[in-house]
Image: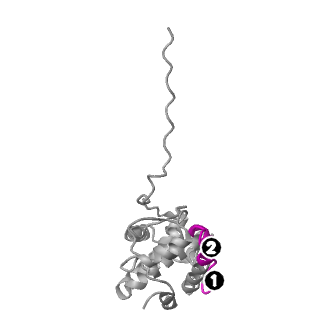
Amino acid sequence: MRFPAATGLLICFLAPCASRADVLNLATLSCAKYENEVLPAAADSTTADSINTVMWLFGYAVAKSGAHVLYPDALAPFGFALDGECKTNPVETLLEALTVVKPETKNPMNLTTVECATFATRHVAMAQSDPESANSIMMWLFGFSTARTGSHLFDADSLGSFQTALLDHCAKHADSSLFDALSAIKLRGKPTHDSGKNAPRPPAKPAQEPPKP
């Protein structure tokens, strides 16, 4: 079973998503490139397939909206809405598109009322019985946490590091809420593919005048 059940519709609707070695910068990635290159390019991905990519973006969009809830039944509608927004406005960035798309608010789960230790115990059990669903939920939380840090970079390869950090935080702060844990985690990401090209150069040092006699 894949979490949530409605994602079966999304599999039929979206093209397979690419394996992602490079970090995606949502602030510079256009909707057209997301639709035409990113999604179709990762058929071999075991971490960020089409479902998990949209799950990450879904979690990111919820956090950017200021909400602190998980909508377990809203992934497919969110995926359809994001696809429609990007097809209508191909030149806008994915970051801009995510601020426009609003998720359905059915059956919300408030992250501020979920104890970290309770989540960790259930996640470990689900990872054994239904690893795909556990991975998808973790990807949503990863996207949510990334937005909480103020970052706009999607580094799918850091999912494992994020999961380790989250479970470790829950072990050390069992009584804290899942929301607090997601807000506290800050991963040190790798640079984007073009990060060195546009990096600002330090100002040139002023020429020193020769000493006066």
Residue 105's tag is 1
Examine the rendering and report whether any part of residue 33 can be seen: yes
Q: Secondary structure at mark 2?
A: loop
Examine the rendering and report whether any part of residue 171 can be seen: no
Which residues lie in the magenta part? Answer: 85-107
| Mark 1 crowdedness (10 Å alpha carbons): few <14, some 14-19, many ≥20 | few
Q: Residue at x 54, y 63 (%)?
A: 28
Amino acid type of the residue tagged 2 in the rendering: Asn
Where is residue 138? Give x, y as percent.
Answer: 44, 76
Please report contact status of discs 2 and 1: CB closer than 8 Å, yes or no: no
Q: Is 142 covered by the magenta stretch?
A: no
Residue 106, quarter of picture: bottom right
Position of residue 191 in the picture relative to residue 92 (left or right) = left
Position of residue 68 in the picture relative to residue 174 (left or right) = right
Earlier in the chain: of badge 2 and badge 1, it is: 2
Q: Examine the rendered structure and indicate whether residue 212 appears above or below residue 27.
A: above
Q: Mark 2 highlights which residue?
A: 89
Residue at the extreme top of the image, as rendered = 213
Identify the colour scheme used.
one colour
In this rendered view, identify the residue nearer to me: 47 or 106.
47
Q: Examine the rendered structure and indicate whether residue 27 appears above or below residue 196.
A: below
Where is residue 211? Give x, y as percent.
Answer: 48, 14
Which of the image's four quarters has the N terminus?
bottom left
Where is residue 47? Give x, y as percent.
Answer: 38, 76
